[in-house]
Amino acid sequence: MGIVTPGFRGRARTADERLPPGQYLVEDFPVLSAGPTPRVRTENWRFTVTTETGRTHEWSWADLLALPSETPTVDIHCVTRWSKLGTSWRGVSLDTLLADVDTAADYVLAECHGGYTTNLPLEDLLDGQAWIAYEFEGEELAPEHGGPARLLVPHLYFWKSAKWIEGLRLTLDEDLGFWEAAGYHAYGDPWREQRYQGD
Amino acid sequence: MVRGRLAWRVGRLAEVRDETPTARTLVLDVPGWPGHLAGQHVDLRLTAEDGYRTTRTYSLAAPADGDRIAITVQRVPGGEVSPYLTEVFAVGDPVELRGPVGGWFVWRPTAPDPVLLVAGGAGIVPLMAMIRARRAAGSRAPVKLLYSVRTPADVYYAGELRRPEPGLDVTVVYTRKAPADWPGEPHRIGIADVNTAGWPAEFAPQCFVCGPTGFVETMADVLVALGHDPRRVKTERFGPSGS
Ligand SMILES: Cc1cc2nc3c(=O)[nH]c(=O)nc-3n(C[C@H](O)[C@H](O)[C@H](O)COP(=O)(O)OP(=O)(O)OC[C@H]3O[C@@H](n4cnc5c(N)ncnc54)[C@H](O)[C@@H]3O)c2cc1C
């Protein structure tokens, strides 16, 4: 399909091949979330990985900071159509965190302070594709951007990069997360414009 | 294959109403519209002659009237789509759209609990849909609206909001210029305004906050500081920028 909207021209476009279809560039860092910003204290911070058999692995804030960190510079893409290129972060690779976790799970449900959840295939968190990030552009990650720590999965729409992350639940079957259960796409690939179910 | 509410449909502009010098309500005829809840939105897709396409999201401003839906668009200077929709798009013109979208920032008229609506600028649109849905359903849920605008000329739905309505309290706060009979100086909404015009936290109202990002961030923090359960504070942030 595709009907022309009479008299609509659109803005002059420059093709930036780092920009997925339907996205535009921003210089600032928009904030989007479903409710108020929680303020999570690092003294109380815990990150838990729970396997399909119920085994848990837990890290405190000090444990997280003691792990080898990485400083990925990545492009991020929000389903509300903004993209931000070349953002730099510091965090711990999920490869490091999951190294000793014994699992046959294919799926992960990321669980956050305040009850937000989002689902991902486990393989999308491995092989250098995802981090628990605690710094943004050389500064502590601000609460409105998910501080003290968030999931960072830059190859998927940014709602998958769950803020105020508390844990990962590994499952054999896919459970839908907060937005996914409300009709957003289960996977969310920005390059295929997977915004809503059925895209 | 895509079916139902996420399929693209063609709507036609049936009627326009200017709300303010920079905002216009567009009433669209959308054959087969499935209905929606107050607070949901639609995606509009525009296509230029050369095939270029772009999409924007707009809140539904009222309950559906059969196949008729309404949105209200604020003109953003230098914007790609909102100047087109408010100045060029004419009665009879077609546009592609899909929806309704969004199942979180919604209010159901069957809910009896008190409601606090906090709007900044164009953020009034989905909250007005809630006020209108309440009226249409004959709901008796008590509603308070706290609405921040720059000047009296920036109030959307001004006539309708001025009309007394049982169980609905409207408080407008002006940030730049107030009407002559308004008590106090223009100011940004603060904790005192929310405390005075809202519900005590013990009443456990459902709170809906909508507007520009900075506004929403501040208001949600204020509500939590006043003791409201964060799980009962739903927010929707308009506009791409962090202003
Ligand atoms: C859930 C939701 C509901 C909404 N409901 C409403 C509503 O009821 N009423 C309403 O008026 N608006 C609403 N909006 C906002 C609306 O979707 C648009 O963002 C708004 O109309 C501006 O679109 P525009 O094309 O005119 O401006 P844009 O062209 O998108 O410009 C807006 C700003 O974004 C930046 N920008 C965007 N695109 C580019 C680009 N290609 N290049 C450079 N900079 C760019 C610019 O800084 C510009 O100042 C809603 C948004 C959301 C997310």
Image (spheres, rainbow, N blue to C red):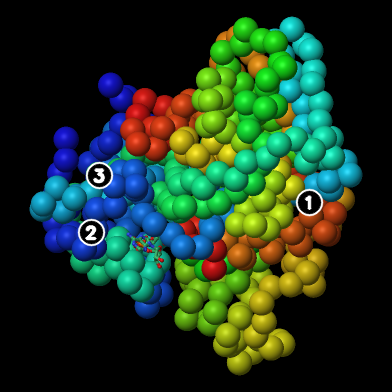
Tell me the distance, in whole angstroms, between the alpha carbons under discs 1 and 2.
Answer: 40 Å
Drawn side of residue B196 relative to residue B178, left or right: right
The local secondary structure at tag 3 comes to: strand
Q: Nearer the viewer, mark 3 or mark 2?
A: 2
Residue at mark 3: chain: B
Residue B203 position in % (x across, y down) = 83, 50
| Whether the residue under disc 1 has CB within 8 Å of ligand 1 | no
Identified at 70% across, 10% down, the residue is: A102
Within 10 Å of the Cα at label 2, are there few (<14), some (14-19), or many (20+) other Cα atoms?
Answer: few
Q: Nearer the viewer, mark 3 or mark 1?
A: 1
Which residue position is annotated with label 2? A13
Task: State the image quarter where residue A62 is shown.
Answer: top right
- The disc labelled 2 sits on which kind of residue? Arg
Which is nearer the eye, A72 or B171?
Answer: A72
Residue A40 visible in image: yes
- The disc labelled 3 sits on which kind of residue? Glu
Q: Are marks 3 and 2 on the same chain?
A: no
Instruction: For ligand 1, give the image quadrant.
Output: bottom left
Q: Which of the numbered marks, if any, corresponds to residue A39?
A: 1
The local secondary structure at tag 1 comes to: loop
Drawn side of residue B123 relative to residue B216, left or right: left
Identified at 50% across, 58% down, the residue is: B238
Tell me the distance, in whole angstroms, between the alpha carbons under discs 3 and 2.
Answer: 21 Å
Task: State the image quarter where residue B213 is shown.
Answer: bottom right
Residue at mark 2: chain: A
Asked if residue B59 is positioned above or below residue B3 in the image, the reply reads below
Identified at 55% across, 44% down, the residue is: A72
| Whether the residue under disc 2 has CB within 8 Å of ligand 1 | yes
Within 10 Å of the Cα at label 3, are there few (<14), some (14-19), or many (20+) other Cα atoms?
Answer: many
Residue at mark 1: chain: A
Tell me the distance, in whole angstroms, between the alpha carbons under discs 3 and 1.
Answer: 41 Å
Q: Which of the numbered marks, if any, corresponds to residue B96?
A: 3
